[in-house]
Image: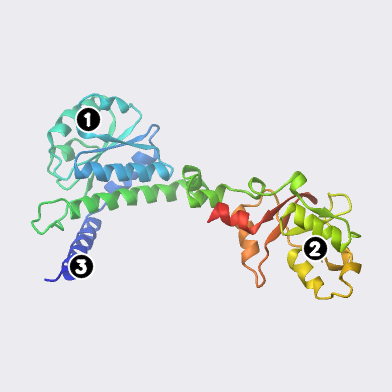
Amino acid sequence: MGVLESIKEIFDIEISELEYVKSNMGDESIEAIEIIRNCKGKVVISGIGKSGLIGQKIAATLSSTGTTAVFLNSAEALHGDLGIVSKEDVVVLISNSGNGDELKSIIPVLKKQHISLIAMTGNLNSYLAAMANVVLNIHVRREGCPLNLAPMSSSTGALVMGDAIAATLMKLKGFKPENFALYHPGGALGRRLLLHVRDIMKKGEEIPFVTQEATMDEVVMELTVKKLGAVCVSENKKSLVGIITEGDLRRALLKKEEFFNLRAKDIMIKNPICATPDSLAADALGTMEERESQISVLPVLDSGDIVGMIRIHDLLGKLK
């Protein structure tokens, strides 16, 4: 068998075993979801070895999708870390065999505190299965390992079971993209959902203004000094009459013989597209980009007053 064929065979084995795990699921999955959903404390995911690594991922996924969760290494739990568990918590123990020595030391302590225990195991006849409130069966017939020894299909089954629990809880809680963003403020999605126009716009003395009667010299000077690629036309630096972009100025230059006789009102764009301070920055970027002729600058209005200007490259710098 060639290398590529071998790789594909492992995919086939693990996909087949995932289907097998799915076929064995029943009402116990619903019960587990309800226990976690109604948990007044946190969800403590515990395991050791490969199961521990899977447990860390499940805990991270739950935490980032609205279910407070932590990981507890089962071996470290025996030496003081079990103190992280409180009476209002739910503990999810992951063990394919369900008979590890650390489980036999941890579980009695948890049971004594009447803590809800969910087992994720491939052995329904194990000590863990017998002691748990709910048992999630992740039994597989065959590991992806050619020797059928190293946890592969079984760890994949546990991983997907954890993903299924997290995703179902998201649906039940009505978890939205903006909620996800709160847990990922440093990521691209967080920036797209949390960043508003007011956070990026130029304001105050940075805003370029000219009056309707401003000469082309004055328009060019204001464009040059403020360097925003456009100027707002206003009589009181408050109410927007129009906007002049560098593109408008270039088009006006085509009329060389009359250019310096023109006034701002002659070349300005009336009723330009604007943003509001509370608009999402991503929405403002979409307004600029999703047009036949792209806009590079938007005035920002609040209750009709000019409060800022926002440039496309400032948005791209923050959102891309």
- Dot 3 corresponds to which residue? 8
Task: Count the marks.
Answer: 3
Percent position of residue 170, x then y = 42, 48
Residue shown at 85% from the left, 58% from the top? 218
Q: Is residue 120 visible?
A: no
Residue at mark 1 to residue at mark 2: CA–CA distance: 66 Å
Residue type, label 1 = Glu
Q: Quadrant where the N terminus lies?
A: bottom left
Observer-nearest residue: 140 or 251?
251
- Dot 2 corresponds to which residue? 271
Per the image, label 3 sits on a secondary structure element best described as: helix
In the picture provided, is 287 more to the left or to the right than 95?
right
Please say if 47 is above or below 310: above
What residue occupies the far left of the structure in this picture? Answer: 147
Residue type, label 3 = Lys
Observer-nearest residue: 19 or 311?
311
Percent position of residue 155, x then y = 21, 50
Per the image, label 2 sits on a secondary structure element best described as: loop
- Callout 1–callout 2 Cβ contact below 8 Å: no
- Dot 1 corresponds to which residue? 76
In the picture provided, is 113 more to the left or to the right than 281?
left
Residue shown at 82% from the left, 65% from the top? 268
Residue type, label 2 = Asn
Please say if 154 is above or below 19: above
